[in-house]
Image (cartoon, helix red, strand yellow):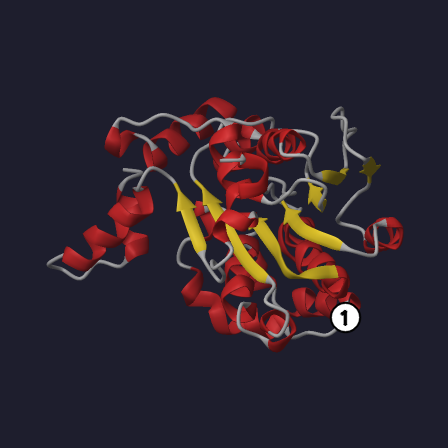
Amino acid sequence: MDLKKLFGFEGKTVVITGAASGMAKSATELLLELGANIYAIDINSIDLPVKKAYQADLSKKEEIDHVIDDLPDKIDALFLCHGIAAFPGNELLVQKVNFYSQKYMTEQLLSRISDHGSVTFISSVGGFGWQQVYTKAVELINVPTWEEAMKWYDDHPDLIQSAYVFAKQCLLSYVTYKCMSHEFISRKIRINAINPGDTTTGLTDDFNRSTSPNGDALEGAKMIENIFLKSWNGYAADAKDMGYPLVVIGSDICSYMSGQLIYIDYGLTSSWTSQALLSSNHKTIEEISNDSNN
C-alpha cells in the first residue's frame, strides 16, 4: 500500500498556522514527509523547509489579510493550530488568537478550498462543556464582520473573563454549527477539531503560569497534574501525539468524517462524562472535573 496515496497530501496545497513549534510543527513535519506543498504561518520564525513561510501576528486583522492576499488561489487542506495561554488583562487577545482569527481565516479562505477539502482545528480539553455557552457562541459566530465582533466582545465582558475556556468553547461550537451549513456541505468540505489533553510544548510554561492564581509555574504545573494526570497516574503527551492525529483527520483517510470534536486525552473527558452520568447525586460534568483538582 502506498501511504502517500492513502493520506492524499502528495502534491496538494496545505496551509497551516502555528507551525513554528509544538503540535503544529509536528504536523508540518509529517505533512512534508507525505509530499504536501505547505504554506506555513506563525508569529515566530519557521525553520522547516516549507514552500513558503509567513511571519505574522494572527491577532491583527491587517496582518491576516496581508497573508491571505498572498496565499494560493487553490487550497486542499487548512489546519488552524495557533493559540496562546491566558493571563489577566489579555482576555480579548486570547479571543482573537484562539478563536476569532481562526473563524475569520476559515471564512476568508473558504472559496479557495477544494471540493472535498478539509478544515481542521486544534481546540482543547479546556473547551469541555461548550454546550453551556452554545447559544452565545452562535450569536458571535453570526456577527458579520471583524469590527462588529470586537464590539460584541466589548459588550460581553462576563463571557470573555474565562478567556481561554470561552475561546475554545466557541471553536468547538463553530465546528458543530457549521459542519452541515450550505457553504461547507454543498462542496463537501469537512470541518473537525481535535481537543488535546495535557501536552508538553513550548507553551507549557505559559500554561503553567496562567493556571496558577499567583502566576507561579510550579504551582500551575501541580494544578494541571491534579486535573489531567493524577486520577489515572498519567503522563503528558508529546507534540507528535497531537500533531500526527491532526494530519490524519485532515487527510483522505478520514474522508467521511466531519463535524467531529475529537478528544485526545487518554480517555479523561470520557471518564468525567461517565462519572457525571452515574453520579447518584446528579453532579454535573463540570463538578466532576473540578473534584479531580481537590
Q: Which residue is mark 1?
A: 145
Give how far across and how far down residue 5 sits, in percent: 58, 41
Q: Is residue 33 visible?
A: yes
The quarter of the picture where the C terminus appears is: top left
Q: Residue flagged by tag 1: what amino acid is it?
A: Thr
Where is 156 relative to 40, above or below? below
Where is 227 relative to 194, above or below? above
- Does residue 261 appear to the left or right of 81 in the view shown? left
Q: Is residue 122 visible?
A: no
Q: Residue at x 26, y 44 (%)?
A: 291
Q: Residue at x 69, y 49 (%)?
A: 93
Give how far across and how far down residue 222 sits, in percent: 39, 27
Q: Residue at x 56, y 64 (%)?
A: 174
179 vs 6, nearest the viewer: 6
215 vs 138, nearest the viewer: 138
Q: State the image quarter where residue 276 is shown.
A: bottom left
Where is 62 relative to 4, above or below? below
Give how far across and how far down residue 9 sits, in percent: 64, 43
Give how far across and how far down residue 65 sits, in percent: 85, 55
- Does residue 131 appear to the left or right of 175 in the view shown? left
Crowding around mark 1 (Cα neighbors within 10 Å: few <14, some 14 to 19, many 20+) is few
The number of callouts visible is: 1
> For the residue labelled by badge 1, is the local secondary structure a helix, a strand or a loop?
loop
Q: Residue at x 50, y 74 (%)?
A: 135
- Does residue 40 appear to the left or right of 252 in the view shown? right
| Residue furthest bottom as drawn | 182
